[in-house]
Image (tube, rainbow, N blue to C red):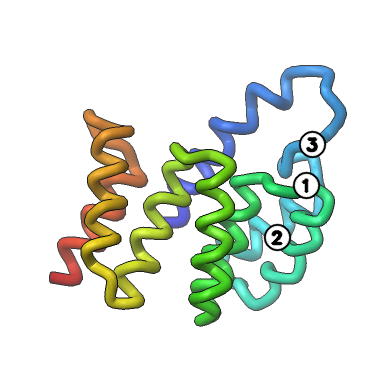
C-alpha cells in the first residue's frame, strides 16, 4: 500500500512547491524526506523519531501525520497510530491514504465494520477507483 502514499503526497504537495510561500511542506524539509524514505523502505523504527521531529516543525501536516501513523502501526503501537490517523483526518477529512491506512488498522485490531465504513468513504471519494480505495478493498477481501 505504500507506493500510492508517495503519489498522494506528491500530488498534494507539488502545487504548493510552485508558489513563493515559505517552506512549509514536507518535501522542502530534508529530515522529512529522509524519514519518508525510511518509512517507504520499511525502516519504521528509525522513521518514527524523525517524523515526530518533522511534525514539531510542521504541526498538523496530514501527510506527516499519516506517515507517522503508518510507522507507529507497523511497529505495533496501535493506539498511538490510531490517534495520529484521527489527527490527520481531522486536518483533511478526504486524505485518501489516511482513510485507507486507518482502515487497515481497523482490520488489524478486529474492527472490520469500521474498515468497511472507511472503504465506503473511499468509494464515495473515488467513485471510479483510486489506489487507496483499491488497496483497502484488497485488504478487506483478503481478511474475510
* 2 or 1: mark nearer the eye: 1
In three-dimensional space, the C-alpha distance between marks 2 and 1, rounded to whole angstroms, equals 14 Å
Name the residue that disc number 1 marks: 58
Q: Quick check: 93 above or below 109? A: above
Describe the element under mark 2 as helix, strand or loop: helix
Residue 35 marker? 2
Quadrant holding the N terminus: bottom left
Relative to residue 113, is residue 127 depicted above or below?
Answer: above
Pick out the residue farthest to the bottom. Answer: 76
Residue at left offset 49%, top offset 48%: 5
Q: CA distance from mark 3 to mark 2?
A: 16 Å
Residue 29 % position (x, y)? 80, 46
Q: Looking at this view, is 35 or 65 the one in front?
A: 65
- The residue pinned by badge 3 equals 24
Q: Is 61 on the left-hand or right-hand side of 84?
A: right
Q: CA distance from mark 3 to mark 1?
A: 7 Å
Closer to the N terminus: mark 3 or mark 2? 3
Q: Residue 110 or 12: which is nearer the viewer?
A: 110
Is 123 placed left or right of 67 in the picture?
Answer: left
Amino acid at each position: 500500500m505504500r507506493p500510492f502514499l508517495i503519489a498522494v503526497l506528491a500530488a498534494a504537495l507539488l502545487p504548493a512547491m510552485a508558489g513563493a510561500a515559505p517552506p512549509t511542506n514536507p518535501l522542502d524539509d530534508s529530515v522529512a524526506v529522509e524519514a519518508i524514505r525510511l518509512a517507504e523502505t520499511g525502516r519504521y523504527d528509525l522513521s518514527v523519531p524523525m517524523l515526530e521531529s518533522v511534525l514539531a516543525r510542521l504541526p498538523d501536516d496530514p501527510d506527516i501525520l499519516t506517515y507517522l501513523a503508518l510507522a507507529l502501526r507497523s511497529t505495533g503501537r496501535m493506539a498511538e497510530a490510531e490517534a495520529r490517523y484521527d489527527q490527520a483526518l481531522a486536518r483533511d477529512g478526504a486524505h485518501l491514504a489516511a482513510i485507507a491506512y486507518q482502515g487497515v488498522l481497523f482490520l488489524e485490531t478486529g474492527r472490520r465494520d469500521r474498515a468497511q465504513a472507511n472503504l465506503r468513504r473511499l468509494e464515495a471519494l473515488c467513485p471510479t477507483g483510486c489506489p487507496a480505495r483499491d488497496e483497502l478493498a484488497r485488504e478487506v477481501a483478503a481478511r474475510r
